[in-house]
């Protein structure tokens, strides 16, 4: 199946061919409907105006579960629509988290990330770290603000087509393995706010919010 959300992440609707149907579970191609992976939540939307309640990656396929029995058959052409405001918020928060994480790694090369999640309204990164992580926020935010203000292009590409491995790349900054949906430029991230949350002994959480 073709994952159109990688090459055309700004596309919010398209027509797709139905490859298989198993009850309310369907597989289509191409698809713009991202399924949760790497901590980034799934898109929300519809296939032929039927709500998709779950998107799951199984082997090399993405299976979409519908809220109702499908009104189409295998080989039919169906309309696919995603909730664009949600997708764009996820893309912005996703990349905000990516660059925050990279600035932490540049400051602490041996820092251990123990968790991450990207939702529509906030992102979080969990670290194994002693001390209050918020003491580093001014320095991290300064780096993020400079990168955002520069409006640098973000390149997304395959590193292994067969295994569907991808990365993002910003010239002069970093190259990072990632299979999410990416912005075109750093400027689209906009202003962000960081919040600290202690989640246990030697465990620090950084929450990331969009300001505008």
Image (cartoon, helix red, strand yellow):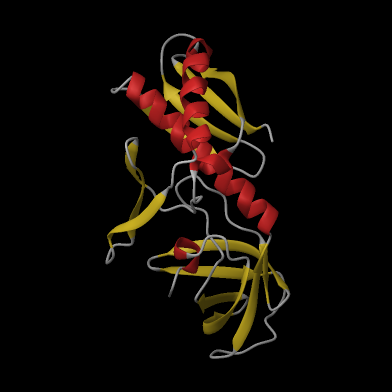
Q: Is residue 63 visible?
A: yes
Residue 39 position within the rendered picture, expressed as x and y whole percent measured from the top left: 49, 44
Q: Nearer the viewer, residue 54 or 152?
A: 152
Can residue 118 be seen?
A: no
Q: Find the residue positioned furthest to the front.
A: 150
3, above or below 38, in the image: below
- Compared with 9, 141 (above or below) is above
Position of the C terminus, as image quadrant, is: top right
Q: Residue at x 34, y 55 (%)?
A: 166
52 displayed left or right of 202: right
Camera-nearest residue between 56 and 196: 196
x then y, percent, for residue 123: 57, 36
Residue 209: x %, y % from top left:
63, 32
Is 170 in front, or is 36?
170
**In this rendering, is residue 179 above or below 161?**
above
What residue is rendered at 63% in x and 46% in y? 89
Q: Quadrant of residue 12?
A: bottom right
Q: Residue at x 59, y 90 (%)?
A: 76
What quarter of the picture does the N terminus occupy?
bottom left
Q: Position of residue 69 (x, y in %)?
A: 69, 79
The quadrant holding residue 173 is top left
Along the line of sight, the residue nearer the viewer: 173 or 105? 173
Q: How many marks are shown on the rendered structure?
A: 0
Residue at image coords 70%, 86%: 71
In the shown orientation, is residue 38 left or right of residue 73? left
């Amino acid at each position: 199946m073709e994952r159109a959300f990688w090459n055309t992440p700004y596309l919010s609707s398209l027509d797709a061919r139905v490859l298989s149907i198993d009850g309310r579970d369907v597989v289509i191609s191409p698809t713009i409907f991202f399924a949760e992976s790497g901590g980034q939540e799934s898109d929300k939307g519809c296939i032929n105006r039927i709500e998709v309640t779950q998107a799951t990656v199984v082997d090399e396929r993405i299976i979409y579960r519908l809220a109702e029995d499908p009104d189409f058959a295998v080989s039919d052409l169906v309309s696919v629509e995603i909730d664009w405001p949600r997708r764009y918020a996820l893309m912005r928060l996703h990349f905000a988290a990516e660059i925050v994480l990279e600035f932490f790694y540049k400051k602490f090369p041996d820092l251990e990330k123990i968790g991450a999640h990207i939702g529509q309204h906030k992102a979080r990164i969990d670290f194994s770290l002693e001390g209050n992580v918020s003491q580093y926020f001014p320095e991290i935010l300064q780096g993020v603000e400079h990168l955002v203000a520069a409006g640098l292009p973000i390149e997304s590409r395959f590193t292994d087509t067969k295994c569907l491995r991808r990365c993002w790349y910003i010239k002069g900054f970093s190259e990072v393995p990632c299979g999410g949906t990416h912005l075109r430029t750093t400027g689209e991230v906009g202003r962000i706010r960081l919040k600290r949350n202690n989640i246990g002994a030697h465990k620090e959480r950084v929450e990331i919010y969009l300001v505008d």
